[in-house]
Image (cartoon, rainbow, N blue to C red):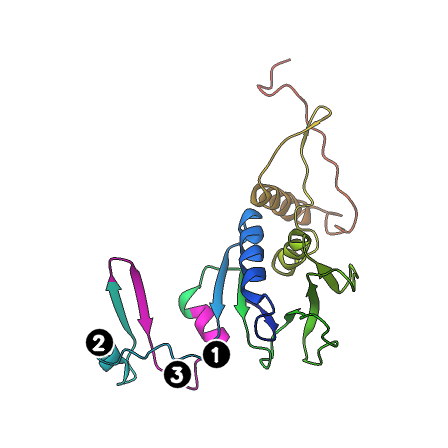
């Protein structure tokens, strides 16, 4: 299931800046991400184009130019964050949705200077660039975007995300996060099939003979 998290706040609060930082940090963590920006501006205003006239018929159309693609589909009852995510980001694990403070989505609220605590439902993180209301559980300040990204990563990878470590002797083996995730999942899956292997709440230690070719 694709998880969608809204980054909401009042106008000019810094939502786009935070979205870009989170998307960068999440990508560095090998999380497959997508981005939706909600705006009150008209986005299908060029009705003189061939694709604009076709989209008026309720049919999706793509305008393909040298600088990229623009997909046009008039708003309808099915235009929801979930529909957009499944249609355009089917391989993503997490979608950052900029805006949507009135949508029923979990939210990161970007606070403005002197603003009172917002009352919108679903807020589980607040981004306060000033750091005046520091609280590691709820309020994050500028410079803590990576911590926020790690918390978001745990939403899609679970609390055990990045918990696998491999040592060669006493030295840790460097691994990308998705490799560590794969190793952990593979080992836990194999252990679960063994008698007594379903109790996976404890740390697992595996010791292998260092002789890689099997020769004595």
Asked whether 79 falls inside the magenta stretch, the response is yes
Q: Residue at x 61, y 69 (%)?
A: 13
| Residue 215 rendering spot, x and y as whole percentages | 60, 15
Instruction: Answer with mark 1 or mark 3, whichever residue precedes in sequence.
Output: 3
Instruction: Answer with mark 1 or mark 2, whichever residue precedes in sequence.
Output: 2
Does dot 3 land on a helix, a strand or a loop? loop
| Residue 160 rendering spot, x and y as whole percentages | 69, 51
Q: Which mark is residue 75?
A: 3
User: Mark 1 packing: few (<14 Cα in 10 Å), some, or many (20+)?
Assistant: few
Q: Which mark is residue 80?
A: 1
Q: How many labels, in total?
A: 3
Q: Quadrant of residue 210?
A: top right
Q: Residue at x 61, y 59 (%)?
A: 156
- Magenta-colored span: 65-86
Q: CA distance from mark 1 to mark 2?
A: 25 Å
Report the residue marked by disc 2. Answer: 49
Q: Residue at x 71, y 23 (%)?
A: 169
Does dot 1 land on a helix, a strand or a loop? loop
Q: Residue at x 40, y 66 (%)?
A: 88
User: Mark 3 packing: few (<14 Cα in 10 Å), some, or many (20+)?
Assistant: few
Residue 52 in the figure: left or right of residue 127: left
Q: CA distance from mark 3 to mark 2?
A: 18 Å
The quarter in which the N terminus is drawn is bottom right
User: Mark 2 packing: few (<14 Cα in 10 Å), some, or many (20+)?
Assistant: few
Q: Which mark is residue 186?
A: none
| Residue 161 rendering spot, x and y as whole percentages | 66, 50
Front one among 82 and 181? 82
Q: Nearer the viewer, mark 1 or mark 2?
A: 2
**Residue 2 appears anywhere in the view:** no
């Amino acid at each position: 299931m694709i998880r969608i998290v809204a980054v909401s706040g009042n106008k000019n609060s810094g939502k786009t800046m935070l979205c870009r930082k989170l998307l960068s940090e999440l990508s560095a963590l090998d999380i497959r991400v997508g981005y939706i920006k909600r705006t009150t501006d008209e986005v299908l205003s060029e009705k003189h184009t061939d694709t604009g006239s076709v989209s008026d018929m309720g049919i999706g159309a793509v305008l393909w130019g040298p600088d990229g693609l623009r997909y046009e589909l008039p708003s309808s009852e099915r235009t929801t964050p979930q529909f957009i995510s499944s249609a355009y980001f089917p391989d993503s694990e997490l979608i950052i949705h900029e805006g949507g403070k009135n949508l029923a989505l979990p939210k990161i609220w970007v606070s403005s200077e002197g603003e009172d605590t917002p009352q919108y439902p679903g807020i589980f993180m607040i981004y306060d660039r000033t750091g005046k209301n520091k609280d590691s559980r709820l309020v994050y300040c500028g410079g803590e975007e990576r911590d926020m990204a790690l918390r978001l990563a745990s939403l899609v990878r679970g609390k055990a995300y990045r918990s696998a470590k491999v040592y060669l002797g006493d030295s840790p083996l460097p691994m990308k996060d998705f490799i560590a995730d794969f190793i952990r999942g593979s080992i836990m899956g194999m252990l679960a099939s063994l008698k007594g292997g379903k109790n996976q709440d404890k740390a697992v230690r595996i010791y292998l003979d260092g002789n890689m070719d099997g020769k004595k």
